[in-house]
Amino acid sequence: MEDGENKLNLSDLAEAINSPNTKRRVSAMSALSEIKDKQAVPILLQALNDNELEVRWAAAWSLGQIGDATIIPELINILRDKQSLIDTVVIRALGQIGDISAIPVLLDILHNGHKDARLAAVWAIGQIGDITTVSELLNTLNGEDKSVSEAVAQALIKIGTPEALAGVIKWRHPTLSDTDVLTVLEEWQNNEQSYRLTGSNATSKWWP
């Protein structure tokens, strides 16, 4: 897209955000996410204060699509507002941005947030892929909420270190010995290499 055309679109969309029509404002959010131009960030930040929940949700989602790490502090401030109704999409936006500076707040939400926020936080941690979170994620696998534990397992698989993968195997199959866990892990790693080379993906029956 040419610079002139891009600026024109941004100008038009900024005007659309002030439209009294909610659907038009939401459509403007979607269009801004497709442009993926960081010049749209101030417009989207402004829309986070819109009176309509649908518009605020769309603005947060679009900010995640653009992926500007400089706005992480502002997104975290939204999460500190206990009355916020867009916390889950803001959390997912942090995952889409993918910067490790969001990890401390995401871990705090994992431990202390409501269920939907915890699920979003685990997804975001997996997206960011910070290996320093593995030990803490492993410690949450045996929590009371099975859906959160399953989400944690998926995040660990996505992070993909040997420690993370072995922990998931052991969690899913607690009767396996440590030696068997290492055997399954080695088999999986060999299968992954085979898949990359041949497209064949025959995994162990023990693989999660």
Image (cartoon, grey):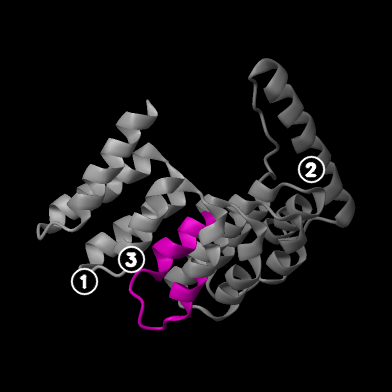
- The three-letter amino acid code for the residue at tag 1 is Asn
Query: Residue at coordinates 68% horizontally, 34% vertically from top-left?
Result: 203
The answer to whether 110 is drawn above or below residue 62 in the figure is: below
Query: Residue at coordinates 73% horizontally, 29% vertically from top-left?
Result: 191
Q: Secondary structure at mark 2?
A: helix
Question: Tag on residue 119?
Answer: none
Q: Mark 1 vs mark 2: which is more N-terminal?
A: 1
Query: Residue at coordinates 48% horizontally, 75% vertically from top-left?
Result: 77
**Where residue 61 appears, x then y in whole percent?**
38, 54
- The three-letter amino acid code for the residue at tag 3 is Leu
Question: Tag on residue 184?
Answer: 2
Who is closer to the viewer here, 94 or 168? 94
**Where residue 103 appears, x then y in whole percent?**
64, 65
User: Disc 1 vs disc 2: which is toward the camera?
Assistant: 1
The answer to whether 85 is drawn above or below residue 55 in the figure is: below
Kindly identify which residue carries mark 3.
Answer: 48
Kindly identify which residue carries mark 1.
Answer: 51
Q: Secondary structure at mark 3?
A: loop
In the picture, measured across the screen, residue 108 lies left or right of residue 176, that is: left
Mark 3 and mark 1: Cα distance apart in space:
9 Å
Q: Quadrant of the N terminus?
A: top left
Q: Residue furthest top?
A: 198
User: Disc 2 vs disc 3: which is toward the camera?
Assistant: 3
Q: Identify the magenta region.
A: 76-95
**Where residue 100 appears, x then y in whole percent?**
66, 58
